[in-house]
Image (spheres, rainbow, N blue to C red):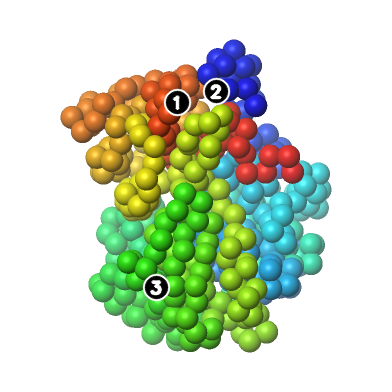
Amino acid sequence: MAGIADTQELQVKQIDVLSFDPLAERLFPSLATGVRWGLERTEKALNILGDPHRSYRTIHVGGTNGKGSVASTLAAALNVAGFRTGCYTSPHLCSFRERILVAGKPLTQDRTLGLAEELMNVPERCGLTFFEAATVLGLYAFEREGVEVAVVEVGLGGRLDATNVIHPEISAITNVALDHSDYLGDSLTEIAREKLGIVKPGVPLVTTESDPVLLEVFREVTSQRGAPLVKASTPALEGIKVYHDRTCFGLETHSWGLLEIETPLVGRHQATNAALAIEVLQHMPDDLRPELETLRSGIAAVEHHGRDQIEIIDGRTWFFDVAHNVAGIDSLVDTIDSLDLPRPLVALVGVLGDKDWKSMLSSLFSRVDAALLTQPPSAPLERRWKPADAARALREITTVRIEEDFKQALIQARTDAGQGTTLVTGSVHTVGSALRILKKEPLRGE
């Protein structure tokens, strides 16, 4: 691969690698983006298609942070256990195909387009948004691909999210933190109630939420709906070992006894996410519960890119994390503290304008040696932030520079880091764009 310092090479590539995924644009070109609450449109579309989501069993995973990691871990464990497993997550980093996996693999582009064509004009007839149509496509694809069990990640909130049309064997909520307040509410209890909208009568809910006030809301809602509430066991913090390429911990379980677990996902928060997945699997019906060895092998096989992902590229250390809210940055900071990263540590940061970037970056900048603020090139125009405003507000914390042009910012950040570490963070848009330029896309070559 050409080095990132090869400016001419980067200029040639910029036209296509920094655009929106062409496949996503081809799938549903006439549908609106953005959020439109309600399940009626999605239910109507699925009904027209014969309710494909009723043909297999499901697990529903919600929460503020970590739900994609939990969903991916569950799917990996079930795949290794021998079940033909679907996994639906969002958003994608680089390719729409990341959202819909069957047996651990993405569908080919031709297959994805073919399945979208089989939907005919149903998305348009039902007035679906892009996310609603993507969800319908994923649920339809799982039926057509002969999936036995599907793990489905909530998109936004829970109660009115398009994924809430499924009737799962079990549900999980990772945690509740402030995010998307313009949609979900200004307080943690309001956000919790929206996320608890995925609770179904008689369906167990498993969580690693630890806040006593929020847990009381969990108990209230699950009691009202006749759903068992399970507080997952989590590993002791002092027993978690974090390395550049894995996280190891011990966990006491009622089904398998004391487990020694290794996940390739990095960070103490990933030990908590893996523990939640294990608790969910313990409460699955007997015929879906993995054996001990396949459980361990499955967790060790999970892939979920852009989450505390450390890569050596051209002899330099790169650290990618999609942290996009205060809780996510707190986990990132904890991971930085847990690792002996080469210094200097230079952060390349691009945040969406509707996020609490001041609180996010105040915490992060206390751990880095310098920061470069940039504009995520694929960020929606209406959600773009103003790096200059952030630089003025945060200049006292660390050395802050601005480079709005993303390609140039990436080159400059690596130059500033030298033999140290370049951290790319702030949003899915920022990390996805960097991975494209560096030829580290999750599905590269597939």
Residue that mark 1 sits on: 414
Q: Alpha carbon of mark 2 to alpha carbon of mark 1: how far?
A: 8 Å
Q: Which mark is residue 4?
A: 2
| Amino acid type at mark 1 | Arg
**In the structure shown, which secondary structural element does the residue marked by tag 3 occupy?**
loop
Q: Nearer the viewer, residue 297 or 406?
A: 297
Name which residue type carries label 3. Thr
Q: What kind of residue is marked 2?
A: Ile
Q: Position of residue 339 (x, y in %)?
A: 38, 49
**Image quarter of the C terminus:** top right
Report the side of 246 relative to 190 (left or right).
right
- Local packing at callout 3 (Cα closer than 10 Å; few below 14, some 14-19, many 20+) is many
Could you tell me residue 140's position as x and y percent?
73, 60
Tag 1 near tag 3, CB within 8 Å: no
Residue 4, image quadrant: top right
For residue 278, the mark is: none
Residue in front for this viewpoint, 412 or 228? 412
Q: Residue at x 63, y 86 (%)?
A: 286
The answer to the question of whether label 2 and label 1 lie on touching residues, with beta carbons closer than 8 A, is yes
Q: Are marks 3 and 2 in contact (CB under 8 Å)?
A: no
Q: Is residue 336 left or right of residue 92?
A: left
- Residue at disc 2, secondary structure: loop
Which labelled disc corresponds to residue 234?
3
Q: Residues within 10 Å of mark 2 (few under 14, many from 20)?
A: many
| Residue 142 percent across, percent down from the top left | 73, 63
